[in-house]
Image (cartoon, helix red, strand yellow):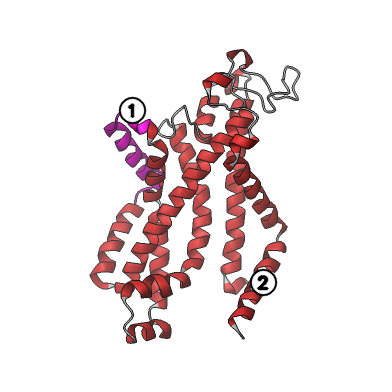
Amino acid sequence: MTASSLRNRIRSEFLYSFLGSPVTVASSLVIIVIVLACVFAPLVAPHTPFDPATISILDNNLPPAWSDKGNTRFLLGTDMQGRDIFSALLYGGRISLLVGLGAVALSVILGSIVGLLAGYYGGWTDAILMRIAEIQFAFPPILIALLFNGILKTALPADTFAKAAIPILIAAIGLAGWVQFARVVRASVMVERGKDYITACQAIGLPAPRILFRHLLPNVLGPVLVIAMLQVAVAIVTEATLSFLGLGTPLTEPSLGALIQAGSQFLFSGIWWVVIFPGALLMIMVIAFNLVADWLRDYLNPKLR
């Protein structure tokens, strides 16, 4: 079988398995729609919710458009400052997705490098790196993210922290989640390093970095992709938690967590739409990512195919 026919066969099997799961197809469509709507928020959103020049306090606390006192200009209503909830969801969702994807990318890079080095070299390298990982693994990721974020918020001036809030969130959540990737990559590398193709690479004198990143890494990416998809949902929830606790994005650039935190104060005063809609979007995003990750895990498991 040629390389071209093998690629075509893998592609056809992937599409057959994907299209054979209506739940996965629906979840993928939901993710695509949400991502595109958030990325192109300036074009899709009917209002600019965080620009004071476009906000009128006279429009505050309007219910959704289908309610008796609703206004057709504001589909999902407005908050206490007169900001359009639908537009705020798109802009806030864009920040949540940016933080979630950026944090997972950082975790994948750090975890993969540590796992490759520990699994390939073994010995003291493996012992030191895995002891560090085990120490961090003993603490909940949210606690590590809270600690890292809180230290920087205390150490940096308020305006500096506000300007760098998103990169700080990405770093805090990414540094809290690399251990899982390191453990999985290490275990896979320890299995792969004894195979003939690695022995052949070593015999012909290929440098270690080329063996690690050119030959070993592509063969251990399967489990990493599954965990990464799951971790996107976890990172989004972690960011929402930090923002809800006041350690996340500033009020000038609120994420979904910050919107939920602001709206929760008015939940029992009858202004339910301010917190329900951000919470619903967050829940839909998390469920969709988890469902796609479940399918990907089953597809990459040869025992289930």
* Quarter of the rendering containing residue 56: top right
The mark that comes first in sequence, 1 or 2, is 2
Q: What residue is rendered at 59% in x and 74% in y? A: 303
Numbered circle sitting on residue 286: none
Residue 107's spot in the image, x, y percent? 41, 54
Residues in magenta, as a range: 138-162
Q: What residue is rendered at 28% in x and 57% in y? A: 132
Residue 75's spot in the image, x, y percent? 70, 28
| Residue 28 visible to an observer of this rendering | yes
Q: What residue is rendered at 65% in x and 36% in y? A: 44
The answer to whether residue 101 is left or right of residue 45 is: left
Disc 1 target residue: 158
Query: Could you say which is closer to the camera, residue 263 or residue 42?
Result: 42
* Quarter of the rendering containing residue 160: top left
* Quarter of the rendering containing residue 249: top left
Residue 257's spot in the image, x, y percent? 51, 34
Q: Residues within 10 Å of mark 1 (few under 14, many from 20)?
A: few
Q: Amino acid at mark 2?
A: Glu
Disc 2 target residue: 13
Locate the C terminus by quadrant: bottom right
Locate the N terminus by quadrant: bottom right
Cα–Cα gap, marks 1 and 2: 53 Å
Residue 156's spot in the image, x, y percent? 29, 33
| Residue 279 visible to an observer of this rendering | no
